[in-house]
Amino acid sequence: MSFALTADREQKLAELLTRYSTKMAACIPLLHLCQEQNGWVSPDVVDFVARKLDLPPAHVQGVVTFYSLFNQKPVGKHQVWVCRTLPCALRGAGAVLHQCEKKLGIHAGETTSDGKITLRTAECLASCGTAPMMQVDQDYFENLTTAKVDEILDRLRK
Amino acid sequence: MIKRTEFLSKVYGLANGHSLDVYEREVAGYATARNVLTSMTPQQVVDEAKKANLRGRGGAGFPMGVKWSFMRPHPTKPSYLVINADEGEPGTHKDRTIMEWNPHSVIEGCIIGCYAIGAHVAYIYVRDELHLSKARLWGAIAEAKAKGYLGATPFGKAYPVEVYVHTGAGAYICGEETALINSLEGKRGEPRLKPPFPAQAGVYGCPTTVNNLETIAAVPSAFRMGCDEFSKLSALHAINDGGFRLYGINGHVKKPGVVELGVGPTLNELIYDIGGGVTGDRKVMCVIPGGSSTPVLRPEETVDAPDEKSPLHAWHGKSVFDVPLGVDTMRGVGTMLGTCCITVLAEGTCPVLAMHNLMQFYRHESCGQCTPCREGGAWLLRTVDKLLDNNATMQELDQLHDIANNIMGNTICAFGEGTAMPALGFLKKFRPEFEAYVRGERNRKDATLTPS
Ligand SMILES: Cc1cc2nc3c(=O)[nH]c(=O)nc-3n(C[C@H](O)[C@H](O)[C@H](O)COP(=O)(O)O)c2cc1C
Ligand code: SF4
Ligand code: FES
């Protein structure tokens, strides 16, 4: 099945291309647009981006594999990223991750069986002054306690 | 001595503090850019900028005005300004506050910066995770455009300036300026060999200046008060380290956060006067002074500068925790100032576990181009892991030094040093703790990063 952008995203792409002197420079923003629609960067998406930007598919694939935010396989409806790096770890990131794993019944890197939540660890998210923290989809949750974690995950699972 | 300032942070926390209205009302926003564009030549702007002694806030501490002066107009190619807001260095959380709470200072800085270096386009490279930051910057751009401060004729001057936000997709290495440029061009974020430097061949092969986001955000304040006055806000003005900065405090302190101060507080001042002291009133075991790539300092360390000509002579014999934090003073005590966000580790924390945590980070984030970095990082992590399992020999412990030393200086970019230097810092300053794992006197089960 070949991939196509929705009409409003096509418009966004047209605007994107005005910002740069080369088509290639739109590669990462366009991949974001596609992933936002498709949930992950499937082989069809790679072909689509390559065609739109006149790039070899291998170039696009190389970009996709370099950046950790591009999903190379389908993921859950919601993304939970727990920051594990030292400043957060010093303030209890270990307990936050443990709580997530316990509550969701999965390990970091896995998706719940209902396909709702993918749990992963993240490297420092520039929020060390309000550690420990996690990112859920586009939002940051800071100064976490296990009670707060429970509350956030309960809301997500509804 | 601590000197609180409110140039960037005055609008932090105000209702709608990120809006153009508040920026214009509270800090005479955009009056400086208007003044610069309508009354100064680009050369005058660069000359004035040098007087600020504004050392780059991205980690390396290169003087901003001098960097601007490297830009030469190319006969056929345009020039670009690139703002580095990748903020990925572990322990660094300052640029995000500017983007969220005072985005207009960045846009105004971009207008002045573009004019100074002869660019008409600025790209602000923000790490993708910072969704609120990106939204605030786009919002500020739209507001500035609507007022005619950006676009074809900013403040009525025929000097077009456009500002765009660009994002990566999760890769710490894209904070390195040449990796950032590759990423901006739509490629894998792999650092380039230097030279050529960005001023010669940056974005699309054109002359480019890369400034950290805090660096550019400080520019309007510096020009508003006069760059000489700006420099004097610092306790280290005399050694060309000027202005105010945002200081971050995180880890084991009672009141973590970000604060704006004249350059030059000491670690003790940040920990006790700003950070409210150590959690549980413990002693400090060590501090990472400016992001995870900067080697740790311990409070027992003293300054050794008997030579009267040394910039550190005034602190000879004193604790390194009583030395004002500056680019050159920190170099003088064997570490780096880095990003000015300190991470405090209290007594009771396991230094081997702390190093292991950081080595996981470096293992994960190496771009893989250089063998010493790619393989060395993995080897360091593996060996520390064995140590924690009481499975490493004394010989393997010694080998950690060799591995780290073999990364240093043998790589394309400074990420290699950023891995090796903190590793060596932990190894040298906590030798007995490392040896205790070899001897089986400590074990992973009892090791903690959160001493209660
Ligand atoms: C591995 C690595 C990561 C870096 N990450 C950042 C970063 O996240 N933000 C930043 O401003 N500079 C970062 N830098 C420094 C940049 O290469 C560059 O020196 C800086 O953006 C220049 O701006 P300044 O002169 O205003 O500090 C990094 C450097 C290295 C080697
Ligand atoms: S030092 Fe490491 S991060 Fe830098 S270019 Fe080499 S492999 Fe990549
Ligand atoms: S270490 Fe978690 S946000 Fe920085």
Image: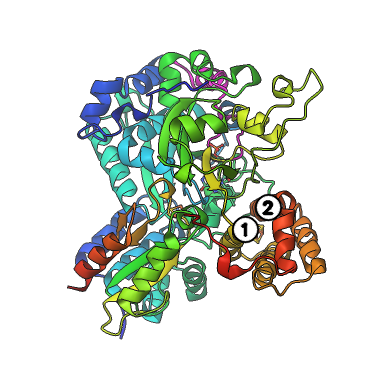
Res B355 label: 1
Q: Where residue B248 sits: x, y (%)? A: 46, 39
User: Chain letter of disc 1?
Assistant: B
Q: Is B426 left or right of B257, judged from the image as shown?
A: right
Q: Which of marks 1 and 2 is nearer the N terminus?
A: 1
Q: Can residue A4 be seen in this view?
A: no
Q: Where residue B262 sits: x, y (%)? A: 49, 23
Where disc 1 sits, the SS reads helix
Range shown magenta: B40-64
Q: Where residue B256 sits: x, y (%)? A: 42, 41
Residue for point 57% across, 63% down: B447
From the image, tell me which residue sits under label 2. B426
Asked if the stretch drawn in magenta spans residue B163, the answer is: no
Q: Where residue A132 sits: x, y (%)? A: 39, 55
Q: Is B194 left or right of A85, judged from the image as shown?
A: right
Vertical relation: B28 (above or below) B340: above
Q: Is residue A72 visible?
A: yes
**How would you classify the magenta stretch by its main secondary structure?**
loop
